[in-house]
Structure formats: structure tokens, C-alpha cells
Image (cartoon, grey):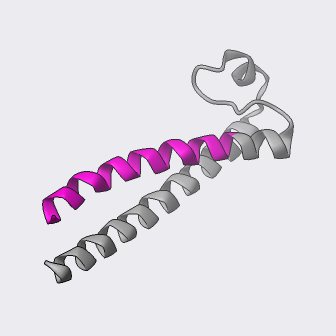
Amino acid sequence: MNSLMKLIGPAISIAAGFLGGKIVDKAWIGFTGQQPPKHGNKEAQAEASMRQAIGFAVLSAVTAALIQVLTDRGTQRAIAKFSKKA
């Protein structure tokens, strides 16, 4: 069971990161009313000021760090819980 949890942990991290990215995009649109200035969005990149680009980068990085910490802690708790049962 321990090896199974070690395989599931990264999958959960990837899914949480994807969901976090979508939440950041929606929050950015909600607060600014503009599309997020990110790679692949040429119109938003051209219109974004440097302040907006830095703000979006900081928001994305903070969200990613929180997601990583929370998923790591959750995975470790799950591994510990299943290790005690086995």
C-alpha cells in the first residue's frame, strides 16, 4: 500500500496544480476584468503592463507553492495512516 500511495501522490499534485491554475485564471479575470498575461495568450501579453505581469507571476507562484505544500502534507499523512494499518 505504501508504494501505491507514493504513486498516487504525484498524480494528486498534478491534478491539484491544474485546478489551482484554473482558479488563479478565474480569480485574475474576476479582479482585473482582463485575461491573464501568460504564455500562449498573445493579446493579453501585448496589453499587460509590467506591473500586471509581475502581479500575475507572484499570484501564480504563491498558489503553486501552497498547493505543493498542502498536497505533500496530505500525501505524507495518508502514507502514515496506511502504514499504521498495515
**Residue 53, image quadrant:** top right
Q: Is residue 10 left or right of residue 61?
A: left
Residue 77 in the image: above or below residue 51: below
How far across and down, in percent of the image, does residue 24 sit? 66, 46
Image location (x, y in percent) of residue 75: 33, 66
- Residue 3 magenta: yes
2 vs 19, left or right, is left
For the C terminus, the quadrant is bottom left
Which quadrant holds residue 3? Answer: bottom left
Helix, strand or loop: magenta stretch: helix
48 part of magenta stretch = no
Q: Position of residue 65 (x, y in %)?
A: 48, 58
What is the quadrant of residue 19 in the picture? top right
Residue at 62%, 30% in the rendered image: 38
* Towards the viewer: 77 or 63: 77
Residue 27: x %, y % from top left = 74, 47
Task: Answer above or below: position of 85 versus 3.
Answer: below
Say how many tags the image has: 0
Residue 37 in view of the camera: yes
**Res. 51 in view:** no
**Which residue is most to the bottom?**
84
Residue lying furthest right: 33
Q: In the shown orientation, is residue 85 left or right of residue 9?
A: left
- In this picture, which residue range is highlighted in magenta? 1-25
| Residue at x 15% of width, y 64% of height | 1
Identity of the residue drawn at 57% across and 42% down: 21
State whether residue 6 is above or below residue 26.
below
Residue lying at the far front in this picture: please name it: 85
Which residue is at 30% across, 56% downward? 9
